Image (cartoon, rainbow, N blue to C red):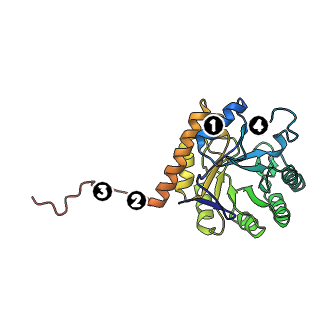
């Protein structure tokens, strides 16, 4: 099987989905099911961990989905580290998506703080998947710090603009082979997801692209198919681009 393998764990789906911005817990559950995703990320700061009231976790079956806590809403390394420790302490997971925001208007990551949090958490036994910029230098530093995957943004979080800097993502893909690369943030529609996989990325993580659609459940299904199509196209190998036309029914060898 052509599986996504992270830290020795295999996933059939290359789509990772978030759980924010849905109208209800029921819609969240329906969209996740339609997406075909196996890994679901949840913000530690937005989950009612004491379970005394209705919680997002009531709509996500941990026996069916692999939970990936994330440190969304953290603005320095210490906050991210505390959030990850809390998630493990309450039994969510010892995997964590590290997200440290450095700029409020753009929600761009503080990559230096992300490297610091990654280094500390890896030493504490966490499997760390950091959200980062599309900078090759910091991607390599995250790998040196022990990251099990690198997740560069395609565009600002929640923007829906799609992949804005193919050159940087291509460089990352060409120069990094030791860990999976997952496009995280900016996906707005199915073609964006397909492009990420066509570029050779190992997976894509999204939330707003599904949750903010007019029909989130239908968009989730579209994203499932887009990721499958993009991966298949990458493996198949596209035809070379040419400046001039080439006849689809060539005349060579045809008798006159």
Relative image position of residue 75 (x, y in whole percent): 85, 49
| Earlier sequence position, callout 4 versus callout 3 | 4
Mark 4 to mark 3 CA distance (whole Å): 57 Å
Residue 151 drawn at (x, y percent):
69, 56
Q: Is residue 19 above or below residue 3?
A: above
Q: How far is disc 4 from disc 1 in space, using C-alphas?
A: 15 Å
Q: What is the spatial separation of the Cα atoms under label 3 and label 2, in whole angstroms?
A: 12 Å
Q: Is 4 left or right of 121, judged from the image as shown?
A: left
Tell whether label 1 touches label 4 (CB within 8 Å). Answer: no
Q: What kind of element bears circle 2?
A: loop
Residue that mark 2 sits on: 239
* Quarter occupied by residue 95: bottom right
**Numbered label attached to residue 31:** 1
Secondary structure beneath dot 3 equals loop
Q: Residue at x 54, y 60 (%)?
A: 2
Q: Which residue is mark 3?
A: 246
Query: In front: 155, or 58?
Result: 58
Q: How many marks?
A: 4
Query: The residue tagged with tag 4: helix, strand or loop?
Result: helix
**What residue does disc 4 label?**
58
Mark 3 or 1: in front is 1
Circle 1 — which element? helix
Marks 3 & 1, CB-CB < 8 Å contact = no
For the residues labelled 4 and 2, the Cα–Cα distance comes to: 47 Å
Q: Quadrant of residue 58?
A: top right
For marks 2 and 1, the one nearer the N-term is 1
CB-based contact (under 8 Å), mark 2 and mark 1: no
C-alpha span from label 3 to label 1: 43 Å
């Amino acid at each position: 099987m052509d599986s996504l393998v992270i830290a020795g764990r295999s996933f059939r789906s290359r789509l990772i989905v978030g759980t924010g911005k849905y109208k209800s817990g029921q819609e969240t559950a329906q969209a996740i099911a339609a997406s075909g995703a196996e890994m679901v990320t949840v913000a530690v700061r937005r989950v009612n961990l004491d379970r005394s009231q209705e919680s997002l976790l009531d709509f996500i079956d941990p026996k069916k989905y692999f939970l990936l806590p994330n440190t969304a809403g953290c603005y320095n390394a210490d906050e991210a580290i505390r959030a990850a420790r809390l998630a493990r302490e309450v039994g969510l997971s010892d995997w964590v998506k590290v997200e440290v925001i450095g700029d409020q208007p753009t929600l761009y990551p503080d990559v230096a703080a992300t490297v610091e949090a990654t280094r500390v958490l890896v030493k504490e036994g966490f499997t760390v998947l950091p959200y980062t910029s599309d900078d090759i230098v910091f991607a390599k530093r995250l790998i040196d710090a022990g990251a099990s995957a690198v997740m560069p943004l395609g565009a600002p979080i929640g923007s829906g603009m799609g992949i804005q800097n193919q050159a940087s993502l291509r460089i990352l893909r060409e120069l990094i082979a030791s860990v999976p690369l997952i496009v995280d943030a900016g996906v707005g529609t199915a073609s964006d997801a397909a492009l990420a996989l066509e570029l050779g990325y190992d997976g894509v993580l999204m939330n707003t692209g599904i949750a903010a659609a007019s029909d989130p459940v239908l968009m989730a299904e579209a994203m499932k198919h887009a990721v499958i199509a993009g991966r298949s196209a990458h493996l198949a190998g596209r035809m070379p681009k040419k400046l001039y036309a080439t006849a689809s029914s060539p005349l060579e060898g045809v008798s006159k």
